[in-house]
Amino acid sequence: MMKLRIQASLLVVALILASCTGAETSTQSQNQDTESQPTTSTDALLKYQDVVSVDYMEDHLTIFASDSMKGRETGTPAEGMAADYLAREYEQLGLQPMGDNGTYFQNFNLNATKTDSIVFSLYTTGEAQQELVDKSTASKNSIANLTRQFGGSDSLQGQVVFAGFGVNDPAHNISNLSGTSLKGKWVMVFQDIPHVVDGDTLISPSIGARARFQSIMQQGATGILLIPSGDNYETMAKEMQSGYGDIDNMSLAYRDSGSGSSGGFSRGYNVINPQLAAQILELTSTTELDNYQQKLVKEISDFKAKPLNYELSHIPYTSKETISSKNVLAFYEGADPELKDEVVVMTSHYDHVGVGEPDSTGDRIYNGADDDGSGTVGLLNIAKAFTEAGKNGVKPKRSILFLNVSAEEKGLLGSRYYSDHAVFPMEKTVANINTDMIGRIDAEHKKSGVEEYAYIIGSEIISSDLDSLVKAANARSGQIELNKRYNDLNDPNQFYRRSDHWHFGRKRVPFVFFFTGIHEDYHRPSDEVHKIRFDKMATIIRTMYASAVMVSNADQPPVVDNEEFIEITATDN
């Protein structure tokens, strides 16, 4: 009897323990289910802006913009090194690859040309038979009386028109580009624009070389011939010799029409030897040319373009090349079951201009620490902030795609390729947050002493909703000055079309572009890491991180409510 009672007691205890263990296991399972569901709290996400670190960005940019990267030029082994570096970092952070065949790379091909030489021939025109006045060849081994600055990938021929300083400025009663048709003509102008003379403003400072170029080309000119000041033509021409035999005029292979055009800018943009310019203008010397220039300054409001009895042919001898390039794509999935299929795309370009002409110190490597090493490394730090939040159970509702594009310096080609081959449908892309050059300050802010600022382009130009979200994000993060100076569709610099957000905007995706302006080291070997203002850069990156949080967690995505921008992009589809 005693033995049976003990056995019965042991059985009861076993059942009780089993019941308790089962209850405990059930409770643990419920807790694990609860813990596996991340919070999507905006407040909780914003706390991770503190992951943005000066040390992190400085460490990575020191490598990314080092001489060993050789300027990260599109289509070179250096571009591949930079892309591999980014892919390794995203992999270590745990972001998903969204490129081709399970990689982080979206590959694309570019058509390009290699120019061996250009032959320039100048003829007189008129009723009599054409007469050759000058013929010269520009190549690695010879200097011509004209020097290509860029473009000129096609054979070109046209009459020469002299247009003074080449500007129309109604506010100051100047119309140099009036008086004759410029269509199909070579437009010869003095390179220096006399904005201010003896303290008086003759031409608006906003009308610079870029604005002049656009005004002339919009009238259908074959090309521009710049007359330089001083006596340094030969030195400048020698510097340009090294470009012959190099790859240039890149274009996206899938967009080429098969018409035989090499892509890129096919019309001409050349500098002319002042001695030849004087001859064309029927002046006896460059001294007379200088005097004539001064005379035009005094009579600038009276001068209008006039045709000359000369015709110029520009014949390049080129070969065609195919170049491979790649974008880098890394994906961070959102946590909301209904919204995670929508994506916020954060972009920077990781390419730069490579190895080129040496500066006064002999440095030939264009490191691109600011352009756009700063934006690219900044995105890495934002990716780290989101992944750190995720490790602690905090995630955004919508997903984030980190997109580092290449071939921006060749004409926004990488972002164009992505926009036409998007891995997420554009209708599911709720916003683009783009950044380029955020590590320095421009002359205006140096003068004013304001350092923590960013020029904001986009936002209400395309979406007032996005503008409101960025402002709210900034108030809770970097608290930088959001400068709207260039946020204008009439901005003569046209920064709204000069970085990769353009190709999202043309697809009706609201965008905001963060940058801090042009500085003295822009596209020079001196754009180096030791000049980057990392503390200032960190404030911008925090505002960008917070902007991504606010957009990804918004109840409704920002909408396009400015059709004027969409109309401007219509010709680029």
Image (spheres, grey):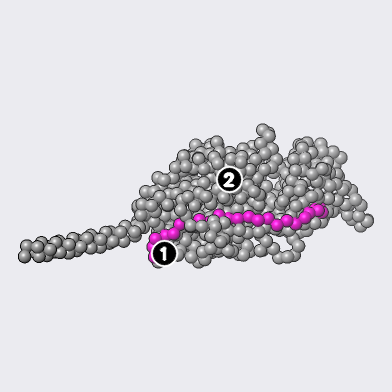
Can you tell which quarter of the image residue 23 is in? bottom left
Q: Which residue type does callout 2 highlight?
A: Asp
Residue found at x 66% / y 36%: 363
Q: Specify which label sits upstream in the sequence, 2 or 1.
A: 1
Q: Is residue 457 visible?
A: no
- The x and y percentages for residue 264 are 70, 56
The part of the chain drawn in magenta is 314-337
Q: Which residue type does callout 1 highlight?
A: Leu
Q: Which mark is residue 371?
A: 2
Can you tell which quarter of the image residue 520 is in? top right
- Horizontal arrangement in the rendering, residue 67 relative to residue 9 (left or right): right
Direction right: furthest residue: 128
Frontmost residue, 405 versus 46: 405
Q: Quadrant of the N terminus?
A: bottom left
- The x and y percentages for residue 286 are 82, 38
Q: Which mark is residue 339?
A: 1
Residue found at x 70% / y 57%: 322
Q: Quadrant of the C terminus?
A: bottom right
Residue found at x 62% / y 49%: 79
